Amino acid sequence: MTSGMVSVLGRTRVLAAIACCCLVGATSAEAASPTHILKLPRVSLRVPSQVDAGAPAVASGRLWPVPHNARVLLQFSRDGGWKTVASRAPRRHAFRFRFYLPAEQEAVRVRAVVLRRGAILARSPVRTVHVRARSSVGTAPPSPSSGGPDSSPVPGGPGSSPAPAAEDPLSAASLMTTVERYARWPNHLSDTATSDAALDEFSAALAAAGLRLGQQAFTYPKFSVSALGLSAGGASVPAAAIAPYLYSGTTGPGGVSATLFDGGNGIFDASKVAGKIVVVSLVSPNNSSSPNLYPAIEAAVEGGAKALVGVTQGVGDYPRLENTNARRGTGPMPVLLVGKHSGAAVIAAAQGGKTGTVTLIANTSGLACERDVWGELEGADPSRRVFVATPASSFTPSASEHGSAYAIVIGLARYYAALPKSARPETLVFMAMGGHEVGWLGLQALLNSSNGSWFRGADAYVHLGSGLGAPTAKEEPDGTVVTTPTPDPSGQLHNSENPLLETSILEDFAAAGVPTKNKAPHEASGGEQTYAYAAGIPMVSFSGSSLYFHTAGDLPSFVDPAILAKDADAFRRSVDTISAIPPGQLKAANTAADSYGESINPDDRAPVNPTLLSNKSGGPPAMPVLSCP
C-alpha cells in the first residue's frame, strides 16, 4: 500500500439559505436554538492515494463540532451518484473506516458525509484513490472477514511471500472464517452497534468483490434494555440465566415484587393471578419457539398479574429467547425467560408461595432504526434479478442461527463475482436484513419502501434462514452434548408450490449431500420469507433450528464445517437452477403460490406481542427512511 496520504480540512458550503436547510429532521426545541443553525460541522477525510486491488484501505478524519446523534457515512461515487458503503458514529471528534475498493475501477472517488436524522450537515472534500492492479495474476482478494493489518507489503516487493492460490469462497475454511467473525459479538440485536457492525462488514465484503452497494433504513418503536434481574424466595438468579422478552413491559429501577404463582405448563386459572408474578414451564418442540408461551402471557395479562417468568428448556442453563413484534410498541407486563436449571428453583419457590422480584428496565421512548443492506452483481440480462438473502439480526452470537447463512450469502457473492458476466444469466442481489427478531421487519420494510417494486419484480427470492450448518445434537441427562455429523432434522425447504422448483431444488440439495425435506404446500413457510411468498415472488427457502437455537451457546464451535460447505453448494446449485430457467417461465409457473399468497396477510404469520392482547399482531409497518441517524 502506498504510504503517501492527503488531508485537507474541508467545510460544507454555507449559503445564506443554509439556516433553513439544516433544520430538516430537527425537533422544535432544536429549531429554537441558534447553535443548530450556525455551528455546522466541518469534516476532513484522509485516504491513501493508491491501493492495490483487493487490499484493504483505511479512511480517517475529524469533524468539529460533533452534532448530537450524528453519524459519518463513507461513500463511493458509482453510476453517477454516491453510494454509502459504511457508516458509524464518530468517537469524540474522529472516525475511521477500513474498506475495500471496487475491483473493476482504476480510480475511485471517496467522500465522508455527516448525517443527522436524515439531514446532511456536512461533506468532506472528495478524494480520489487510484486502484493499482496486482502484479500476480489470479490472486484472489483477501476475505474481508479475515482481519489483518491496515497495510501490507505490495505483492512481489522486497521481502514479500509468493502470492497464495485463489481461495474458494465456498470452502469450509472460508465460510467458517466468516462465521467466526460474525459470531465474535455476544448478540446482533437490531438497533445496536453490534448489528450495525455486522451489516457494515457484510457491505464491505460485497464491495471488495466488486458489487454495487445499496441499503434501505427503517424505523420502529424502541425497546433498549439496560438492566435485568430476578430473585425468587430471597435467592437471586444468575444474570447469565436470565433473558428479556422484548417489548413485553418494563419495571422501575427497583423492579416489581409480589407473591410467586405456580402456573404449571401455562394452563391456569387467570382469576387467581391478580397482583402476582406468574411462573410457567415452557416447552420447545424441535428446539424452537415455545407454543405455550403466548397463551400463558395472555392469561396472565387478563388476570392482572404483575409479571411473568417463563422457564425455558434450552440446553444447559441458557435461557431460550423468543421472537416478538415491535410494531405496536411495548406491552403492559414485563416477562423474563430463565434457563431450566436456575428456573427449577424459581418453580419451587412459586410452588411454595414465596415472594419474587422481576426487574426489566428499558428505554421505550422514541424510535429505533435498522437497515437492510445489499450488493448488486449485474448479469448478462440486467433486466432480470434473483435475490439471495438472509436475516442478520439476532439475540445471541447466532453462529448456526444466522452466522452460517450470513457466511454462505457472502461466499456466494464472491463466487459469482469471480465469474465472467456472460456466465451469470441474470443480475444477482445479495442481501442481509435487519429487524428480524422483533417482528420480521426487514422484508416487510423493503416491500413498503420505494424499493418495493424493484424487489417484487424479481424472478425469484432465495432465502437462507436459520440452522444451516447445524448438526444433529442431543443433551444427555447428565448435561453432556452429543453431536452427530448429519444436518439437524428440523431443516425444511419451501419452494412456493412452483413445479419448476419443487423437484429440481430437492435434487440440488440431495446432489450437494444434504438431502432436505420439503414443507407441506400452502403453509407460506414459517419465517420472514412469508412476506416474499405473499408478494407472489417465486421462492426457494430454508429454515430450521438447532440444539443451541436462540441461546448464548450458539457459538462457531457448534457449526459443522462439512455440513456448512455442503449447504453452500446446495444453494449455489439452486441459484444456477433458477438462472437457467428461460425468462418468464418461472413466474408463469407460480400461479398456485400466487393465488394462495394473495389470500394471506403475512403480518398475521409474523411473531406477535401477546401482552397486547387484541392488538398483539400486525400494527403500523416499519417506516422506511432515508438513513439511520
Image (spheres, grey):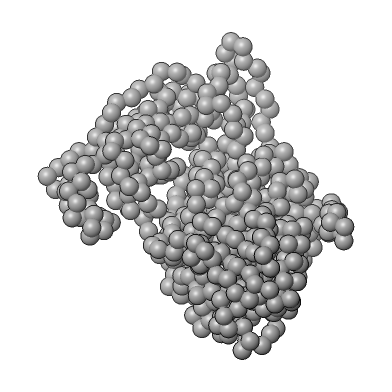
Depicted 138 relative to depicted 257: above or below: above
Depicted 243 relative to depicted 46: above or below: below
Total labels: the figure holds 0
Depicted 329 relative to depicted 198: above or below: below
Q: Position of residue 198 (x, y in %)?
A: 55, 46
Depicted 310 relative to depicted 20: above or below: below
Q: Position of residue 112 (x, y in %)?
A: 35, 37
Q: Going 66% across and 75% down the picture, which residue do you hit?
A: 260
**Which of 149 and 330 lies nearest the eye of the viewer?**
330
Q: Position of residue 509 (x, y in %)?
A: 75, 57
Q: Position of residue 242 (x, y in %)?
A: 65, 60
Decide if residue 418 is on the left or right side of residue 60.
right
Decide if residue 24 is on the left or right side of residue 415.
left
Report which quarter residue 65 is drawn in. Answer: top left
Q: Is residue 568 visible?
A: no
Q: Going 19% across and 51% down the picture, which residue do you hit?
A: 33
Report which quarter residue 105 is drawn in. Answer: top left
